[in-house]
Amino acid sequence: MSAPLYNRDILSLAVATAEYLPLPGARHHASLRAPLCGSRILLDLDTDDAGRVTKVGMHVEACALGQASASLLARHAAGKGLAEIRAARAAIAGWFGGSGARPDWPGFDLLAPAKDYPARHGAILLPFDAAIAALEPQAARA
């Protein structure tokens, strides 16, 4: 028997997005929408001079799984740069697609029940896509 899709841990992560208030003065911003489910995220990232994330702010309109993923991104993005976030996103997508092991991003074991629900994958990947979109312009200037 598989674990329930929505459980106490996922719901706790979902409400934790409220801990990451938008950062209008942040260096990097992205606004993205997942076309399949309509989930939306406004993501603000502050970074140090080397491009490593120092602070995360967001506004998320998504299912509990998308919100949980956003909280996991926010909790563990500090100190990571564009390459590490891209690698995490690729690992998550590979895991969902059956071509890789569970991603090495803390807490993603809690989202394992969603692996069997492809319609939810876009919402879960959305925070990572937003972080990549926010950080890419900085990489282009480097």
Image (cartoon, helix red, strand yellow):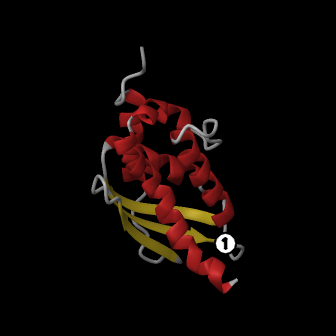
- Counting the numbered discs, the total is 1
Q: Is residue 25 above or below residue 1?
A: below
Q: Name which quarter of the figure residue 47 lies in.
A: bottom right
Q: Amino acid at mark 1?
A: Gly
Percent from the top left, x then y, of residue 103? 61, 41
Percent from the top left, x then y, of residue 45? 52, 68
The one nearer the camera, 58 or 93, is: 93
Q: Quadrant of the N terminus?
A: top left
Q: Quadrant of the C terminus?
A: bottom right
Q: Residue furthest bottom?
A: 141
Question: Is residue 78 visible from the viewing direction of this image?
Answer: no
Q: Residue at x 57, y 40 (%)?
A: 95
Determine crowd level at label 1: few under 14, some 14-19, many 20+ residues with C-alpha closer than 10 A.
Answer: some
The residue at which mark 1 appears reads as: 51
Left or right: 19 as drawn, with respect to 77: left
Percent from the top left, x then y, of residue 60? 34, 57
Q: Residue at x 59, y 55 (%)?
A: 77
Q: Secondary structure at mark 1?
A: loop
The one nearer the camera, 7 or 117, is: 117
Q: Is residue 112 above or below residue 132?
A: above
Question: Is residue 9 visible from the viewing direction of this image?
Answer: yes
Q: Name which quarter of the figure residue 23 lies in.
A: bottom left
Percent from the top left, x then y, of residue 51? 66, 72
